[in-house]
Image (tube, grey):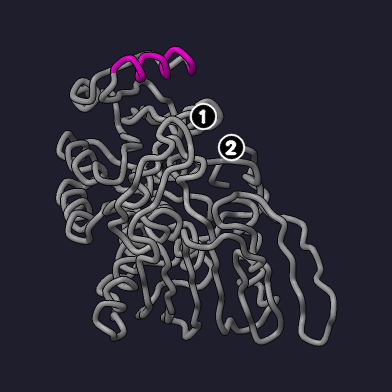
Amino acid sequence: MKSVKVGIIGCGNISSIYCQAGQKFDVLDIVACADLDYERAKARAEEYGIPKAYTVDELLADPEIEIVINLTIPKAHADVCIAALEAGKHVYVEKPLAVTREDGQRILDIARENGLLVGGAPDTFLGGGIQTCRKLIDDGVIGEVVGATGFMMSPGHESWHPDPEFYYQVGGGPMFDMGPYYITAFINLLGPIRRVTGSVRISFPERTITSKPKHGQKIHVEVPTHITGILDFENGAIATLITSFDVAGSKLPNFEVYGSKGTILVPDPNTFGGPVFVRKHGTQEWEEVPLTHGYADNSRGVGVADMAYALRSGRKHRASGDLAFHVLDVMHGIHDASTSGTHYELASTCEQPKPLPVGLKEYTLDD
């Protein structure tokens, strides 16, 4: 299969793992990177042997590049995605797809008008841990799925992150920061979501940075920091999701799925690996299940590789724009439902992503 030429926009910390993916997947050929800070792009190119360090405009003008990986901050996601699409490039963007539903829909509309693909993180659901859980559900091991729970409990980022303000600005908060991992995993395991409701609050309107170099500076909190959502799936299952930056500590599991015949303890959806445990009805013990799929280590970039395979073969890609937009709609819906005091009926939907085949050769995604 002919490799796909890829350019990266945004050369911050997360770009490293995508550059590594370009070295592992033969279908990806990262030929350029760009950043508003050209010196940062140049340093990343030198570190990973990427042929070209560009300005953003230069990268978008390069006719060789087929896919743009957008690793900018959330507020810039929509503008960069749209610019890339208008330049005739397919786009894969870090989560969330956009800050607003309107911008997310514009991205999808422009892509469809131009016959281009959109993909979006997270792609952790393609890892060995959650793919193993998907196989257990599809094989009927826990019977009919009744419900699920997900908990992301954290004290926030101001104690360790060097620049934590954006986590508390529009486009941030625990739901938009970490919710995509959980909601994407929910959809992969249970299918699309029909309606949501929830309650949200800003627990502490002002927070103090205790990390360096901004120790002592104050953060004005613009977004809810403790969110509880209820998700009704099209298949009848009901899930509870709590995301918080206001919890000092917790012993709650990250993720569980409940069925008529048993329960699956799902690994952290922010990771690719395991462990996976199952407890059947009538038993007292949890049984660890060996992973059935690869990509158990940090494999960010597998979603881009899957999109590149789709681009060459014509099949659908799994970490799709429709999936990313459905996740965005769900997150906003939980916040909107809290404001209105009602359920929010999802205006969007998506196909449940197809599971990865068992027994794939390493760093390939098709049989």
In this rendering, would 178 be left or right of 221?
right
Q: Position of residue 197 (x, y in %)?
A: 36, 80
The residue pinned by badge 1 equals: 26
The disc labelled 2 sits on which kind of residue? Tyr
Rendering coords of residue 180 (x, y %): 42, 58
Q: With respect to residue 360, does 137 lie above or below?
A: below
Report if residue 330 lies within the magenta region. Answer: no
Residue at the spot 31% in from the left edge and 60% down from the top edge: 223
- In the displayed structure, 124 sits above or below 40; it is below
* Region of the chain picked out in magenta, as a range: 38-48
* x and y percentages locating residue 163 in the rendered image: 39, 37
State the CA–CA distance, disc 1 to disc 2: 8 Å
Identify which residue is drawn at 35% across, 65% down: 202
Q: In percent of the image, x 41 and y 49: which residue is there?
A: 121
Q: Local crowd at mark 2 within 10 Å, few (<14), some, or many (≥20)? A: some
Q: Tag 1, which secondary structure?
A: loop
* Residue 175 location, quadrant: bottom left
Compared across the picture, whether 228 is left or right of 89 comes to right
Q: Residues within 10 Å of mark 1 (few under 14, many from 20)?
A: some
Which residue position is annotated with label 2? 363
Q: Earlier in the sequence, mark 1 or mark 2?
A: 1
Instruction: Tell me the quarter of the picture where residue 321 sits.
Output: bottom left
Residue 237 horizontal/vertical position (percent)? 50, 82
Q: Main secondary structure of the magenta part?
A: helix
Considering depth in this image, is 114 or 173 the residue closer to the camera? 173
